[in-house]
Image (cartoon, coloured by chain):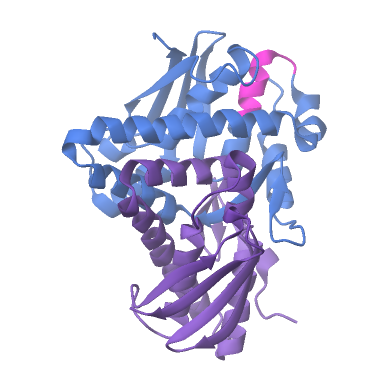
Chain colours: A blue, B purple
Amino acid sequence: MAIDVSKIIHAVMEGSKIRESKGIIPLFGVYLSLFSVYYYNRLSFDFEIKMGPQREAEAKALLIEAAQECGYATFHGIRDSWEWEQVVTPMVESKEDQILGFVAVAVAFGWGDLAIVGLDPGEKLVMHASDSYEARGYLEQYGLATSEKCYMLRGVAAAFMDLVYGADYPDGCFTFAAQEPRCRAKGDSYCEFVARRSSG
Amino acid sequence: MTIFDWQNELNRDGHRVVISGQPIAMHCHHYNINLQKTLEETLGTEGVDLLYRSAEETNFNSLQHLFNRYKKITTLKSKLEMASLLYQNCGLGIIHFRKVRPNSAEIVSTSSHHVTGWLAKHGRRATPGCHFTRGWIAGALEVIYNRPPGFYSVEERQCKMKRDEACVFRVKER
C-alpha cells in the first residue's frame, strides 16, 4: 500500500488554515468547520439520554444513519476534489487504497487514531481506534458505558465501503452496515468497527 | 495587528487536532446539518434547545480558556474582536457585534457555515435555523461579561436560511 498518511494530514492542516473572505473553509470539496469535540459528544450523548431508554435503539440508529449519510456525501466530495486529485490520487494504486486515503483524511480531521486492520475487498472492513474522540468523550463526561458509543465512526466506516464497493454515487449509500463490537467507552482496550454488506 | 496568533494556535497533538491545546474535530456541512435536522425532526423544540445549549456551553468554555491564555486581551472591544476572529477562523462565518451592552446586544452575521450548509443541502427554510450561532453568541457574551451559562437568551430575528439579507440576533437577559 502506497498511501502516505502524513502527506495527507499535512495537506489537510495547511488547507484548514486558509479561509475565504466569508469565513468559510472550502477544502477537499466540502465546507469545513473546526469546533470542540465536547460539542459533538454532548449533542450525541444528550440526544440519546433525552430519547430515553425506550427509544435508545432509535436514537443510536438515527445518529449512525446521520453519520453514514454524511460520510457518504463528504467522502464522495473529498474523492472528487481538486485536493484529492493532487495529493492522494498519485498514491492510489488499487481500489482498496481509496479506503486508506479516506482513513488518512479522517485521522487528519481529528476523529481518532484510526487504522485499517482487515479488508476483504467488496465484503468486509475492520477498522480499529485506540483513541476516538467519541469514546474518550463518553468516558470523561459520563463514565463507563454499558454499550458501544462511537456512532459517528460506525456510520463512517460503512460509508467508506459504500463509496468503494457500492453502486455509483448517489445510489450506493447503506449498501454496507457497520457494528462496533469493541469500544473503549465500555472498557475495551480499543474500538473496533466491522462493516459488512447490509442484510436488508 | 492582532495579539491572537491564530496560525500557531491550530495544531496537532499526536493524532488529535487542537486549538490552544483544546481538542477539536473538523466536520463538514453534511454532518453538522444532518445532526441539526435529526435533532429538530426527532425532538422538536427540545432538540433545538440541545443544539443551542451545547454550542453555548462549549463556546463559553473555549473562550474562557482563550481569555485566560491571552491575558492582555482585557477590553470589551478586544474581547469581541477575538470572539469574531475565532468564529471566522473556525470556518463558522462572519459575525459583527453591534450595540453590545451588559444587558442587551445586536449581532449581525452576513455569512455562516450553517447557512451555507443548510441552503446547499435543503434550500430555503420557513423558520430561522441558526441555533448553533445563537448558542455560540450567548456563550461568548456570558464569558465576556463574566456571567454564568444560561444568563442570556438569544433570538434570531432574521435568518439567511429564510433568504433574509442577513442573520440578525437580539440578545437580552433571561
Residue A109 in the image, given as x and y percentages of width and height: 58, 44
Nearer the observer, B103 or A64: B103
User: Please, which residue is most extreme toward the front here?
Assistant: B126
Task: From the viewer's perspective, tell me whether residue B34 is left or right of residue B94.
Answer: left
Residue B41 in the image, given as x and y percentages of width and height: 38, 42
Nearer the observer, B73 or A182: B73
Q: Is residue A130 above or below residue A171?
A: below
Quarter of the image that includes the C terminus of chain A: top left
Query: Residue placed at 49% from the left, 22% from the top?
Result: A158
Task: From the viewer's perspective, tell me whether residue B173 is left or right of residue B35.
Answer: left
Looking at the rendering, which quadrant does residue A170 occupy? top right
Q: Is residue B20 above or below residue A176?
A: below
Q: Is residue A117 above or below residue A45?
A: above
Give the residues in magenta: A93-102
Residue B131 in the image, given as x and y percentages of width and height: 46, 59
Query: Residue placed at 52% from the left, 46% from the top?
Result: B32
Query: Residue placed at 55% from the left, 18% from the top?
Result: A161
Nearer the observer, B19 or A66: A66
Query: Residue placed at 58% from the left, 47% from the top?
Result: B118
Task: From the viewer's perspective, tell me whether residue A87 is left or right of residue A165.
Answer: right
Residue A168 in the image, given as x and y percentages of width and height: 65, 15
Does residue A131 belong to the magenta stretch? Answer: no
Q: Is residue B52 visible?
A: yes
Looking at the rendering, which quadrant does residue B78 occupy? bottom right
Nearer the observer, B115 or B17: B115
Quarter of the image that includes the N terminus of chain A: top right
Magenta span main SS:
helix
